[in-house]
Image (tube, rainbow, N blue to C red):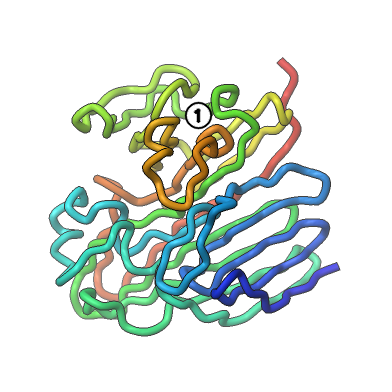
């Protein structure tokens, strides 16, 4: 059965998509996916039980779209900063704006949706379009498409800020990062190199550079391996606030750090986009799950 319904999440409109035993909840604000869950399985995405669904306010969890800059604008490359005039909210402008549902289609391969960011952006006077294309079949594919329609080059950083659900952060590991360099933002942004798989024993906030096309999130308690396949990206941010910082976050229960991990498919730092007039770029993430291989 495939069904696409208009839905309300608190004060915010959106859609609920059901297909082949999977459910996907999407907000119109920010084109933000809130939930992705397959029948009989734990959720693949984490969304805060304290999330506040109010206009103009970001929602904690799911997959926020960060664009046309990521994080603190002041930490972005100078050419990205130069694109912005006036106020610069954390993680850009797209996640607090309403998007339009352009079309939907269903065939033997699955169901697809296309959403587009509408209207001018305050403080960002450039002629560009941004759309998000979703494909739901035996996996979930997200494709964030940029198109520079203007006569001047554009510099952009961006991310699919994915919050993944885990059984216990202290039991999971991420593989595929071996030998990758990363910026340790918790220690004066020093450049370091990953050795082996990444496990978690404290607050984590790292920008990984030069990534392979596939990462794995292994969860032994849920006996699940999440496969994150990316295209158009060589960078990712891995984040967990741990116990102390979790107390200071909005829309975040005190113990929720144990059940989530952000792996943010991105174009940041020296991987930021430079789009010539007329140029296009797609950032894609395919998320699938399988039983954890026996050791």
Q: Horizontally, is 216 left or right of 263 in the view? A: right
Q: Residue furthest right?
A: 1
The one of 256 and 118 positioned closer to us in this rendering: 256
The answer to whether residue 281 shows anywhere in this view is yes
The one of 92 and 131 positioned closer to us in this rendering: 92
Q: Position of residue 58 (x, y in %)?
A: 43, 62
Q: Horizontally, is 49 left or right of 291 in the view? A: left
Q: Position of residue 265 (x, y in %)?
A: 45, 48
Q: Position of residue 254 (x, y in %)?
A: 50, 38
The answer to whether residue 209 shows anywhere in this view is no
Answer above or below: position of 83 versus 48.
Answer: below
In what quadrant of the picture does the C terminus appear? top right
Total count of labels: 1
Residue at disc 1, secondary structure: loop
Q: Horizontally, is 111 left or right of 96 in the view? A: right
Answer above or below: position of 136 versus 223.
Answer: below
**Residue at (38, 22) in percent of width and height:** 194
Residue denoted by label 1: 176
**Residue at (66, 69) in percent of width and height:** 112
């Amino acid at each position: 059965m495939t069904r696409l319904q208009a839905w309300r999440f608190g004060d915010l409109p959106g859609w609920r998509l059901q297909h082949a035993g999977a459910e996907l909840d999407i907000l119109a604000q920010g084109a933000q996916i809130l939930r992705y869950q397959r029948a009989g399985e734990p959720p693949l995405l984490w969304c805060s039980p304290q999330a506040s669904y109010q206009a103009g306010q970001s929602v904690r969890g799911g997959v926020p779209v960060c664009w046309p800059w990521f994080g603190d604008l002041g930490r972005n490359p100078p050419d990205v900063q130069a694109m912005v005039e006036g106020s610069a909210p954390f993680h850009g402008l797209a996640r607090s704006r309403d998007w339009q549902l352009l079309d939907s289609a269903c065939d033997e391969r699955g169901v697809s949706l296309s959403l587009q960011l509408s209207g001018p952006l305050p403080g960002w006077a450039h002629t560009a379009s941004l759309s998000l294309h979703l494909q739901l079949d035996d996996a979930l594919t997200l494709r964030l498409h940029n198109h520079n329609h203007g006569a001047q080059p554009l510099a952009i950083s961006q991310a699919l800020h994915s919050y993944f659900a885990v059984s216990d952060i202290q039991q999971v590991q991420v593989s595929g990062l071996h030998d990758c360099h990363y910026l340790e933002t918790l220690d004066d942004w020093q450049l370091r190199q990953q050795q082996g798989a990444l496990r978690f024993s404290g607050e984590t906030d790292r920008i990984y550079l030069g990534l392979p096309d596939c990462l794995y999130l292994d969860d032994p308690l849920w006996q699940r391996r999440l496969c994150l396949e990316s295209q158009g990206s060589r960078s990712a941010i891995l984040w967990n606030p741990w116990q102390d910082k979790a107390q200071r976050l909005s829309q975040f229960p005190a113990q929720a750090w144990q059940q989530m991990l952000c792996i943010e498919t991105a174009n940041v730092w020296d991987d930021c986009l430079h789009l010539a007039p007329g140029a296009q770029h797609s950032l894609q993430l395919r998320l699938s799950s399988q039983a954890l291989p026996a050791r």
